[in-house]
Amino acid sequence: MSCDKIQDLLSPYLDGELDSSGRAEVDSHLDTCPDCADLLARLRTAMNAFAAFPEVEPAVGLSLKLEAIPVRARRFRLRFDVLLRPAFQPVLAAAAGFLLLAGIYLVSPDKGLINRTISRQFHRSLGSVEKIYVQAGSLTDRLGEYANTIFASAKSINPIGRGKD
Amino acid sequence: MLVDLYSKKVFNMAFQFTGSFQEAEDMTQDIFIKLYRSLDKYDLGRNFTAWLLSLAKNYLIDEYRRTKWEKKSRDDFEDHAPTLAGSDNPESGLAEEETRRVLWAGLNRLPAEIRIAVILKELQGKSYEEVAEIAGAPVGTIKSRVNRGRLQLAQILKDDKEGNHEL
């Protein structure tokens, strides 16, 4: 077996995951290959050294900082994050505009004047829409007439001029 | 209660991954904020420690990729581990200390996914199955990552002994 294949087996060998035949195969290679035997020794050294690394104690202040994250603030921030998403900003702007206008209306001393103005503007706008609708209707009628004229002219044309012969 | 039970685990994982005590503290706070925000997504049928460490692992790797952050050198491990057991024999004690130093620095040279697998398996003593659950990868993939990490670290030890100091 090649050294590359043996190297892939060294971890399972050290973890005790090889069956007896796999183990015997690795042992036999190690007996004749000083490079792989050296690699195995280093792997053992590394694993033993890692096993001796202790857990490190965090600074005392860390626990206090972690405990100081108030649950309510986190929940609020979670909902607030949704409101601050860029996709939500046009909705916020529209809502702010609507609230501003509603506020002006509510505090205005002369609501009757505002109502009359709104009504007048509404009916003017409605009149404008009606005019546009009528103009659009006459335009389609005229287009229809133009189309009929073009078809009639096209029928009277003789493209190869045979009639004159 | 969550802080008492899990802050040390999360902090150590962050410290082992980044090699920086200060970064690990900042990241532990970020991970706990993320934890509180994600608690409603926790599936009660799942092992809570594995779920939390999975969240921490995702944060560490995302942060690593997002900031392309890589320290040139790590804090001296010995500075933060005053209780580190020494050997009775001063000579072998020095050799062990040197091995620890080289391995600790060598962690920085492992790719992020391999580094996490090695940290969980070797430094935190998890089984391959536990590492697979935390990493969200098949056990075979984790075994392969740990094997590659071990071989790379063995090579780093060899290079150090032969005087090819790149650490």
Image (spheres, helix red, strand yellow):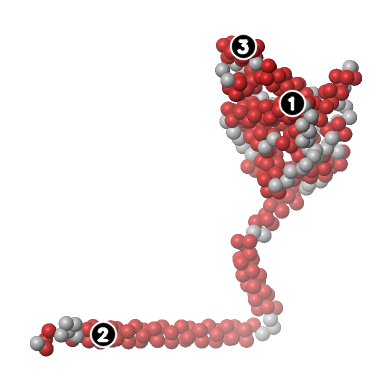
Marks 2,3: beta carbons within 8 A: no
Q: Which residue is mark 2?
A: A150
At 87% from the left edge and 23% from the top edge, which residue is drawn? B94
Which quadrant holds residue A135? bottom left
**x and y percent of residue A138 in the render?**
35, 87
Distance from label 2 to label 1 (Cα)? 92 Å
Distance from label 3 to label 1 (Cα)? 23 Å
**x and y percent of residue B148 in the render?**
64, 29
Quarter of the image that includes the N terminus of chain A:
top right
Category of crowding for the residue at label 1, using alpha-carbon neighbours closer than 10 angstroms: few (below 14), some (14–19), many (at least 20): some
Q: Nearer the viewer, residue B85 or A4?
A: A4
Chain for numbered disc 3:
A
Residue A137 against residue B54 in the figure, above or below: below
Chain for numbered disc 2:
A
Q: Residue furthest left?
A: A165
Q: Which residue is mark 1?
A: B158
Say what amino acid the circle numbered 2 marks: Ile
Would residue A125 be seen by someone viewing this image from the given angle?
Answer: yes
Say what amino acid the circle numbered 1 marks: Lys
Q: Marks 3 and 1: same chain?
A: no
Which quadrant holds residue B49? top right
- Which element is circle 3 on? helix
